[in-house]
Image (cartoon, grey):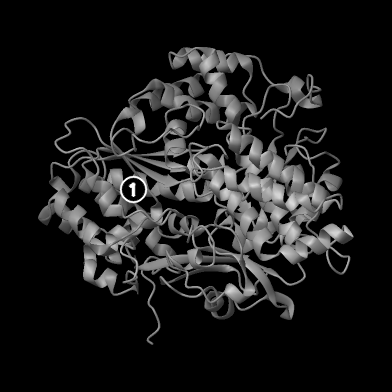
Amino acid sequence: MSQHHGPKPVSPHAAKVPAGPLPAEIREKIVELLGRYPSKQAVTLPALHLTQDRLRCVPPWAVVEIADLLDLSPAEVHDTLSFYGFFRPATDPLGKKRLWICRSLACALRGADQILDEAAHKLGVEVGGTTADGAITLELAECIGACEGAPACMVDDEHFHHIDQDGVLDKLVGELRQA
Amino acid sequence: MAAFEPVLLQRLNKPECKTLEGYRADGGYRTLTRALKEMSPDQVTTVVKDAGLRGRGGAGFPTGLKWTFLPKGNSGPVYLCVNCDESEPCTFNNRYLIECDPHQVLEGIILASYAIRARVAYFYVRYEYGTGTRTMQRAIDELYAAGLLGKNILGTDFSLDVFVHRGAAAYICGEETGLIESLEGRRAWPRIKPPFPAIEGAFRKPTIVNNPETLANVVHIVERGGEWFKSLGVPPDPKNPRDAGSYGSKLYCISGHVNRPGIIELPMGVTLRELLEVHGGGVWKGRKAKGAIPGGNSMGICTEPEFDIPLDFNGPGKVGCLGLGTAAVTVFDETTSIVDVLHNICRFFAHESCGQCTPCREGTAWMLKIVERIKRGQGRLEDLSILEEVADKIGIMPGTTICGLADGAGWPVKTAIRKYRDEFKAYLREGTPKGGTSSGMRLSMAAGH
């Protein structure tokens, strides 16, 4: 469900998003995956992942290229893409690293809401935003399945546990800034 | 009673078994080898059906029975979809299975595929399990290299491909037809059933969707037999002719305000109290428990005096919860405001409703708005009955939605208000939790909400 009212401001580091076409090896990987499924459309999600892993967003020109590779209309690819809040538009690409802080029940019972605030303060961004140097995007996550290590977070797709302990979040953020 | 020896978690502390060599040295793939050479696919199905194994993903549908729903004499393709989109809050049992013992899950996948005559299995895994995804992929690569996947496995005429397919952080993909839509490259909007996936599933072909823990159980059932499986857990309630029993062991997750959060495998039927006191180390900070969710957010809430319920397929229902769910228990202590707990749960469902059915899309959003209003101290007494009315009217039980997400969103609301009505009323009168302080879970209207 869209929560946006009017056009979103363009992130400062959005200018770094390259223009097309998709790198040859990404196109090749997409084509290679076609053999795994009885329909070309099934490669949509893997193709979007490959694109965002490389570009940190899925620009409109990439949607057109993916659609072309999968014999779909760009609208069909966009329909799927827009369902998952996971994929970022070119006006608001991910930073080099995505830091997601879990806020669901098991983590919230152990202070997740404060940690999210603390992280936003440390990074000087709002939740959903990216630091001006383009290093870190801060996001909230619904349950990431690391409840025994609550409060927990993810960096891209890896879990970090007990981030309420002294210095853990500072150290993590420090490392991400250097990455 | 002799201490229970873990079955599914027997290799939890044997990291060497993550490799094919280590798993084989530990007895792995012996069951598969024997089954492929000595048993017909139907014999495997019969063993699983007779063992009374019920799905571990939440609904508890009998696994072997599900397999028999595939059309007879079907000449076209059949698919297995492994549902590792484990996104129910407080649930992480399958993460342990795929991270710690990937070959056990894969042996189950191959056995199940053999039984249902699938030639392709899709391992749909939530994006958040990056480590587990890579562990599974490495294990799959090893199997192809060793001739245990691909064409003519172990020299038989059985061939199977297993492909990993990553989700993109959406709870609804754990609903089996939402998963199928997502796999096919569309938005994960659940399908109207019937037809059920066994008749028309992935790519409009007969499809079985099973959970990794369920499939891991298949290995041990085929190895040790149904009688062994039935020696664990709880037999059917003789007074309930529709009860299929709660056989076998279960991976229980425990988290929240406990001293030792973690995962433990136990025969089905442990009480919530024993799980908390013995295995979870009791409530933290020397406090008492106020309540718990017995099986993920969508099962509803049980109060501390209700902790003597057995965590089997029937237990949570006896105290008005929706069911066993994922058997993931999250405990909250006596200092926690029930309003905070309910707010957090409502926020989750409002965020994760897929938006396809109006009652769920609007209902979850409005329930959150109302609970938020209460939490801010601006609630009215009649808000409780409005919440109960909304919660009662969204879902597949009242028949207003396509999938069960809304039932799961309504259940915590209904159980919380019914069981903690006095606390809600006091909060509504005073505009703050009793004692004036909050547990620290507070309103968060952050972006991305």
Residue shown at 21%/48% (left/top)? Answer: B115
Q: For label 1, count other residues whose C-alpha is less than 10 Å away and answer few (under 14), some (14-19) or many (20+).
A: some
Q: Is residue B97 left or right of residue B220?
A: right
Q: Is residue A29 visible?
A: no
B443 over B315 or under it: above or below: above
Give amino acid for label 1.
Answer: Glu
Q: Chain of mark 1?
A: B
Quadrant where the image shows the N terminus of chain A: top right
**Which quadrant would residue B168 be assigned to in this image?**
top right
Point out residue B5 in the picture as x, y percentages from the top left corner.
Answer: 37, 77
A145 over A56 or under it: above or below: below
Secondary structure type for disc 1: helix
Residue shown at 66%/56% (left/top)? Answer: A105
Point out residue B214 in the picture as x, y percentages from the top left corner.
Answer: 36, 56
Q: Residue furthest left?
A: B38
Q: Is residue B88 visible?
A: yes
Q: Nearer the viewer, residue A10 or B230?
A: B230
Point out residue A152 in the picture as x, y percentages from the top left corner.
Answer: 67, 56
Residue shown at 40%/59% (left/top)? Answer: B101
Q: Nearer the viewer, residue B328 or A45?
A: B328
Residue shown at 75%/57% (left/top)? Answer: B340
Where does label 1 land, which residue? B142
Point out residue B63 in the picture as x, y percentages from the top left corner.
Answer: 30, 53
